[in-house]
């Protein structure tokens, strides 16, 4: 008895997972990984390849239903002009509510994450005298106000850099040595 979502190999063996992934595993097992692009219009500059289902064919255990393509050709082969037009049309008239715009803005600040406050308090010390200068609510706030790289402040707080922007930075409960 064959269930609808089960895939059976040509030898009659039931394959786990069914469908798309099982067939791609079967292709790799029997024919090896895709190693070239069979698209005659390809510029042949990519080095990653995939099996792609030929148009108007079904996912079956037959190599003739598939073609080897590089990542760019595979993407272009799967997305038709009609699909691109539909996607563009659906995005063109999309409007965000004012509440949604505010939430996007808060999310971009790096301070608010739902009801949880994800930011850690950081302390800014003078790079030479090691005296306390200021306490900041978040790394992103200090980064924006002082125009210092956010990632450099973060690396300084985590001990990967000594200073960032000429200052020593530490998270609140970590002393300066």
Image: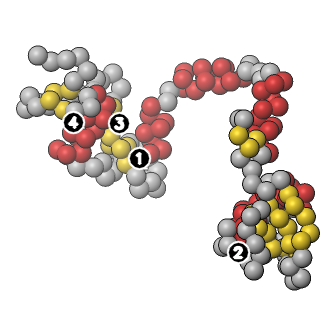
Residue nearer the viewer, 110 or 125: 125
Residue under numbered circle 2: 161
Q: Is residue 149 left or right of residue 17?
A: right
Q: Is residue 75 left or right of residue 101?
A: left
> Dot 4, crowdedness within 10 Å: few (<14), some or many (≥20)?
few
| Residue under pointer 1 | 70
Under tag 1, what secondary structure?
A: strand
Dot label at residue 63: 4
For image coordinates 26% across by 21% down, the residue present is 5
> Can the viewer see residue 65 in this picture?
no
> Residue 35: where, in percent of width, then height?
31, 52
User: Badge 2 local density, few (<14 within 10 Å), some, or many (20+)?
Assistant: some
Separation of residues labelled 3 and 1 (CA atoms): 9 Å
Callout 3: SS: strand
Is label 4 in a helix, a strand or a loop?
A: helix
**What secondary structure is found at the residue carrying circle 2?**
loop
């Amino acid at each position: 008895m064959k269930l609808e979502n089960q895939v059976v190999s040509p030898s009659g063996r039931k394959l786990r997972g069914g469908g798309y992934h099982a067939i791609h595993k079967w292709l790799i097992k029997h024919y090896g990984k895709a190693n070239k692009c069979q698209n005659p219009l390809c510029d042949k500059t990519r080095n990653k390849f995939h099996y792609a289902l030929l148009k108007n064919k079904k996912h079956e255990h037959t190599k003739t239903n598939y073609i080897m393509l590089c990542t760019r050709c595979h993407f272009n082969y799967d997305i038709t002009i009609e699909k691109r037009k539909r996607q563009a049309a659906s995005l063109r008239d999309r409007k965000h509510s004012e509440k949604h715009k505010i939430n996007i803005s808060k999310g971009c600040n790096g301070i608010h994450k739902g009801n949880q406050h994800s930011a850690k308090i950081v302390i800014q010390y003078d790079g030479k005298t090691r005296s306390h200068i200021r306490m900041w609510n978040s790394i992103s706030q200090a980064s924006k106000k002082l125009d210092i790289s956010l990632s450099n402040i973060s690396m300084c707080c985590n001990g990967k850099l000594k200073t960032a922007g000429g200052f020593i930075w530490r998270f609140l409960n970590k002393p300066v040595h």
